[in-house]
Amino acid sequence: MTISSLTPRPLIAGNWKMNGLTEALDQARAVAAALDAKPVGARVAICPPSTLLHRLAQILEGSTVLTGGQDCHPQVCGPHTGDVSAPMLVDAGATLVILGHSERREAHGETSALVATKVGAALAAGLEPIVCVGESLAQREAGLAVALVTAQVRDSLPAALAGQAFAVAYEPIWAIGTGRTATVADIEAMHAAIRAQLAAMFGEAGKTPPILYGGSVKADNAVEILGAAEVGGALVGGASLKASDFLAIIAAA
Ligand code: PGA
């Protein structure tokens, strides 16, 4: 078996965050239609807000575009007002879920230990988790980025992931929604550190999960970022909201 046959297809996932009313579904329709007319090498997913998830999944049924959630609760059901469980995401048509995004770690106080329990719940429901990690600007400037991100990987990924389909997304917090991106050298250094941590945790099985980059990925920087060593795709926020912008990034993968 050659190395390339072990390398999974890149994953380009759109994270709509708390954006999108009914008319946004037209953007997803346009992405699906373009990719069905002209298939690409990458796997493509759209992660809308929960209110659109079921309708989006119905629209994307029969297309190559996957549907994902943006978070899930560790429990299957119960008294958790406002939360959505992993089986509920599956029921609505999701096959992936973003977990541990920095906006949830910061705004909702999510720890890596909590993220790990959510990953376990996602796996139990049959979802493919995209687990986000990333440092703040202050942490990077203090020289703590690699140690911090490596610890996030260690503590956010449960042992149950061994041999399962999952991705890690490296998203430096200071690059999210700011128009700033990490340099290719910084991305490659961090992705190498994450890969080493995955290999330490999962052995052979740690060599294949894609490591996505996220943080102001746009059409004009996608070729450079997606061409960097150990970059197995992208988690795209703002530029995933418009079909033409998202398609331009997908074409770069
Ligand atoms: P951005 O968001 O592409 O708008 O920077 C990325 C993310 O937070 O996943």
Image: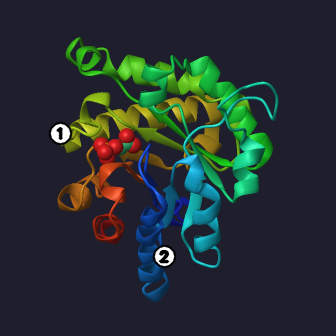
Colour scheme in use? rainbow
Q: Disc 1 to disc 2, how far (Cα)?
A: 29 Å
Residues at discs 1 and 2 in contact (Cβ within 8 Å): no
Going 24% across and 56% down the picture, which residue do you hit? 218
Helix, strand, or loop for circle 2? helix
79 or 145: which is nearer to us? 79
Going 32% across and 32% down the picture, which residue do you hit? 172
Position of 91 with respect to 195 (left or right) is: right
Q: Within 10 angstroms of label 1, few (less than 14), some, or many (20 or more) residues?
A: few
Position of 126 with respect to 231 (left or right) is: right
Where residue 59 appears, as percent x and y from the top left, is 59, 73
Q: Quadrant of the C terminus?
A: bottom left
Q: Which residue does the numbered mark 2 point to in the structure image?
A: 32
54 or 144: which is nearer to us? 54
> Ligand 1 lies in which image quarter?
top left
Amino acid at circle 2 = Ala
Residue 154, above or below 202: above
Helix, strand, or loop for circle 1? loop
Query: Residue farthest to the top?
Result: 142
Q: Cβ(mark 1) to ligand 1 < 8 Å?
A: no
Q: Within 10 angstroms of label 2, few (less than 14), some, or many (20 or more) residues?
A: many
Going 60% across and 26% down the picture, which residue do you hit? 115
Position of 123 with respect to 166 (left or right) is: right
Where residue 177 appears, as percent x and y from the top left, is 26, 40
Query: Residue farthest to the bottom?
Result: 37
Amino acid at circle 1 = Arg
Q: Which residue does the numbered mark 1 point to in the structure image?
A: 180
